[in-house]
Image (cartoon, rainbow, N blue to C red):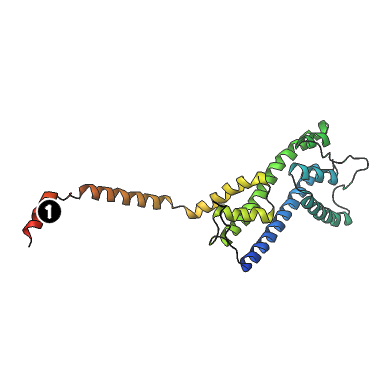
Amino acid sequence: MGSPRKPRVSAEKRRELQVAAAVAREALLQANVRQALQLIGLASNRVSVIRMLGIYMRVNSLPPADADLVTTRVLALLGEDAQNGEGPRVYVEGEPSVAESLPLFGVVRDRLRGRALNDLRRWVELHTGTTQVALLNVHVEHALRFVELLEDTHSITAGLRVYTDLVGVPKTLADTLYFFVLERLAAEGLPTTMDRARVSSLSARQRTQAAETPVPDRRRKGALKQALP
């Protein structure tokens, strides 16, 4: 047997999906910019903006294209503050760049050395958790839109696959996103406790009625047939 055929999507629906994907990517970009600015704020000028941005990109596994967009937005926003004599230091002469070969949190230990930065190392780790949850929430909101747009032609799983492909969801996040979307859909799609109780009560009555209904005597039925002309 061949592989199952993919549900067909009309040209109009495809355009809707492209717009929805663009909206989702912009929302993710804005979320990353907000989170990156928060992380820079935690450094309180003890570490340069460029170094903190490098750390942010690495620990949150942003692909190069997304990292460039986030960096540009962040520097543009900080540049506006710098014109007013405010904002953190963007560069520090002689400060090394973030090493690409280091493991995920090895980059934090390597680039934030010394007792004076013990608190910042811990804050970066905690901030990474809040960032991942914030990005996941953005994904859930927009993935639900895709499921809604495709509900007539696609299963939930197939609709989410379209979302992950168009928006570029990391494979490591896809399963978690699937379960969070199901949880949100279950809040609206599953029967309530009262509904389940009503169904359960109805089933119980039906079972009781079935048990109380007398079973017809086959011999009497046969005698009646013979008596009738």
Residue 217, visible in the rendered structure: no
The total number of labels drawn is 1
**Which residue extends farthest top?**
115
**Image quarter hosting the C terminus:** bottom left
- Check the image and report above or below for 19 versus 65: below
The three-letter amino acid code for the residue at tag 1 is Lys
Q: Decide if residue 24 is on the left or right side of residue 225.
A: right
Q: Decide if residue 50 is on the left or right side of residue 177.
A: right
Taking the spot 59% from the left edge, 48% from the top edge, the residue there is 178
Tag 1 secondary structure:
helix
Residue 28 rendering spot, x and y as whole percentages? 70, 54
Residue 146, visible in the rendered structure: yes
Taking the spot 66% from the left edge, 46% from the top edge, the residue there is 171
Quadrant for residue 8, please give it. bottom right
Residue 170 rendering spot, x and y as whole percentages? 68, 47
**Which residue extends farthest bottom?**
12
Q: Decide if residue 216 is on the left or right side of residue 126.
A: left
Q: Which residue is mark 1?
A: 221
Residue 158 rendering spot, x and y as whole percentages? 58, 54
Taking the spot 10% from the left edge, 51% from the top edge, the residue there is 220
**Which residue extends farthest right?**
93
- Check the image and report above or below for 216 versus 114: below
Q: Nearer the viewer, residue 36 or 207?
A: 207
Quadrant for residue 30, please give it. bottom right
Decide: few, some or many residues near mark 1? Use Cα within 10 Å; few <14, some 14-19, many ≥20: few
Q: Nearer the viewer, residue 31 or 26?
A: 26
Residue 110 rendering spot, x and y as whole percentages? 82, 34
